[in-house]
Image (cartoon, rainbow, N blue to C red):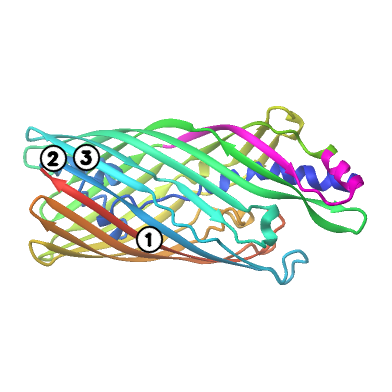
Amino acid sequence: MRSISRLLIPVLCLAVSSTAFAAGFSIFEQGAKATAMGGAFSATADDPSAIFYNVAGIAQQRSTTVMVGGTGITFSNEFRGDPNDPFTSGFTGRYNRHLFIPPNAYAVVPIGKNLTVGVGAFAAFGLRTNWQDPWIGRFVSRDADLRTKSFEPAIAWQTDDGRFAVGAGYEYRESTVVLNRNSAALNPFNGRIIDAANAYLRSKKAHDSGYNAGILFKPGSWRFGVSYRSEQTMNYKGNATFTQFPTGNAQLDAAIKSQLPPNQPINTSINFPAITIAGIATTAIPNWDIEFDVSHMTWSRFKTLNINFETTPAANLTRPQNWKDSEAYRLGANRRINEMWDVRLGAVYDKNPQPTSGVGPLLPDADREGVSFGVGYRKGHLMIDATEFALHFKTRSTNGLSNDNFNGTYKTDANLIALNFGYRF
């Protein structure tokens, strides 16, 4: 029965450590117009979603405006086992389909000629990876659900001529995480790997606060924007529940039960990155706004993850992550058709921060390429923006280096539909 303890306990502990991979999934789509322009919006920043992209941009908005909406996100993912891996060879897997809808809402109010105040609510990080049964990777992850929500009051000021603006905001962020996976054991009577138990982890709300700041400069037909959103750290506290699966063999069941940790409180922390965006835009071509942005995310803050079991501290775990900083390159254009209609195009190349050794069922991340198309409608006080955004993840293989000893190749695609309604008073 010693073979049971050698396999069962490490697998149960690693169930918690997988939480960290979800933190690498940022959601940059926080306004339909910006999304239609590939996210290249820090130098344009001419609707209330500037609170997210470049808070200085709200200073140039001289009408009280309310805007609400969201982005519907669906993923398709295929896993193929490594033909050279004795465990995964010949196996495939796919996601269950889920519609993930990060909402957003903004309001801006000008004060006098130079000042604007605003408030925004958005979800800048999140993940849902839920694999269809039967799933060979259930010992690594069956389902993961990371959610965040942020609330941000903001203020911005511009010069009398409107050529220069600065802004800042205070961001309060909440986050929760749920993980579900099975745990394995080796049946000593027949030498087979079996499902021994289910590990279900649910956190309470974690929270932290930070700030963002931005600068906007508009000399002639050119615009330059720079924004910064500070890093945050989420300290999660929650509960781990372990549910044993009966095997029908009383001796084996008793051995597994003796090795299962009790249900207990757990805690861990996740370092969320800082985000810096720099953009340049031009209106030199009549009826066109064209912008190019570069964004940088400090994922290198995420070097290790410490897992603490409060009842059985002997199971505590420190796991290296070794993520790296990542950049994204965004190009967007807005074409004014007439007083009522705009047409928009965008493209993005987004480099992932995850080392090959960390690629797995919880987050099979990869470099991403996307194209977007959108329209904007204005009539009287009403604004409507709609966008279709297709995002392709490059094929990513673990190359036999998986930290979870789960090797194979992942192919992922995402489709995003963004919609916002606004009203200018």
The residue tagged 1 is 416
Q: In what element is the residue under mark 3?
A: strand
In the rendering, at what x and y percent does residue 299 appear?
A: 49, 45
> In terms of depth relative to the viewer, which is nearer, 281 or 12?
12
N-term mark: 2 or 1: 2
In the image, what residue occupies the spot 32% across and 40% down? 121
In the rendering, at what x and y percent does residue 302 appear?
A: 54, 42
N-term mark: 3 or 1: 3
Tell me the amino acid under the disc marked 2: Thr
Range of residues picked out in magenta: 231-257
Tell me the amino acid under the disc marked 3: Ala
The residue tagged 3 is 107
The residue tagged 2 is 64
Which numbered marker is on residue 79? none
In the rendering, at what x and y percent does residue 254 appear?
A: 88, 41
In the image, what residue occupies the spot 36% across and 62% down? 348
| C-alpha separation, residue under disc 3 versus residue under disc 2 | 7 Å
Asked if the residue at tag 2 contacts the one at tag 3, i.e. Cβ–Cβ closer than 8 Å, the answer is yes
Q: Residues within 10 Å of mark 3 (few under 14, many from 20)?
A: many
Q: Is residue 325 left or right of residue 170?
A: right
**In the picture shown, does residue 58 fall above or below 369?**
above
